[in-house]
């Protein structure tokens, strides 16, 4: 009898622990979105604009802006996986724009 009770208790504890760990994974999408879009992509875009990326790399800056816009739109519909992918594309384009702006030839008047 005690062995059955102990087995039932162990089964209940294991089922409870699995369900708790499974529900903890549900929050990963929004957390990854916040780390990618507002922090990484928007920050990289601001840096690119600060060094003149909008003048020297207009395609990359415009692409980054549009990818951020689409990412935020998808997050509004709770499609976080797609949103994070667009956020990564935005950050990549913003970093590319920054590099183009930093590597532009100097236009010194002599």
Image (spheres, grey):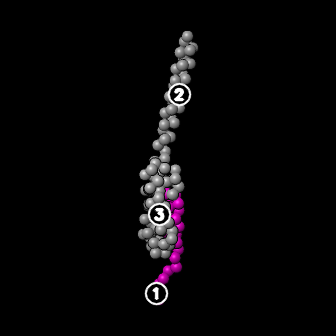
Which mark is nearer the camera, 3 or 2?
Answer: 3
Q: Is residue 87 above or below residue 62?
A: above
Q: How far apart in space, not on screen, are marks 3 and 2 (Cα)?
A: 44 Å
The crowd level at tag 3 (other Cα within 10 Å; few <14, some 14-19, many 20+) is some
Residue 109 got which mark? 1
| Chief SS of the magenta region | helix
Mark 2 residue element: helix
Q: How far apart in space, not on screen, are marks 3 and 1 (Cα)?
A: 36 Å
| Contact (Cβ within 8 Å) of mark 3 with mark 2 | no
| Contact (Cβ within 8 Å) of mark 2 with mark 1 | no
Nearest to N terminus: mark 3 or mark 2: 2
* Residue at image point 52% right, 79% down: 105
Task: Report which residue position mark 3 lands on.
Answer: 66
Magenta residues (range): 87-110
Mark 3 residue element: helix
Q: Quadrant of residue 1?
A: top right
* Residue at image point 53% right, 55% down: 85
Which mark is nearer the camera, 3 or 1?
Answer: 3
* Residue at image point 48% right, 37% down: 23
Residue 82 in view here = yes
> Which residue in the rendered view is the most extreme toward the top?
1
Q: Is residue 62 left or right of residue 7?
A: left
Total numbered badges shown on the rendered structure: 3
Residue 35 got which mark? none
Task: Report which residue position mark 2 lands on.
Answer: 15
Residue 101 in view here = no
**Magenta stretch holds residue 89:** yes
């Amino acid at each position: 009898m005690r062995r059955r009770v102990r087995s039932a208790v162990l089964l209940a504890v294991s089922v409870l622990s699995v369900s708790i760990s499974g529900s903890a994974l549900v929050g990963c999408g929004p957390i990854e979105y916040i780390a990618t879009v507002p922090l990484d992509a928007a920050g990289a875009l601001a840096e690119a604009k600060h060094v003149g990326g909008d003048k020297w790399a207009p395609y990359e800056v415009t692409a980054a802006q549009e990818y951020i816009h689409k990412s935020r739109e998808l997050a509004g519909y709770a499609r976080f996986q797609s949103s994070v992918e667009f956020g990564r594309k935005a950050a990549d384009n913003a970093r590319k724009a920054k590099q183009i702006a930093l590597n532009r030839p100097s236009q010194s008047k002599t």
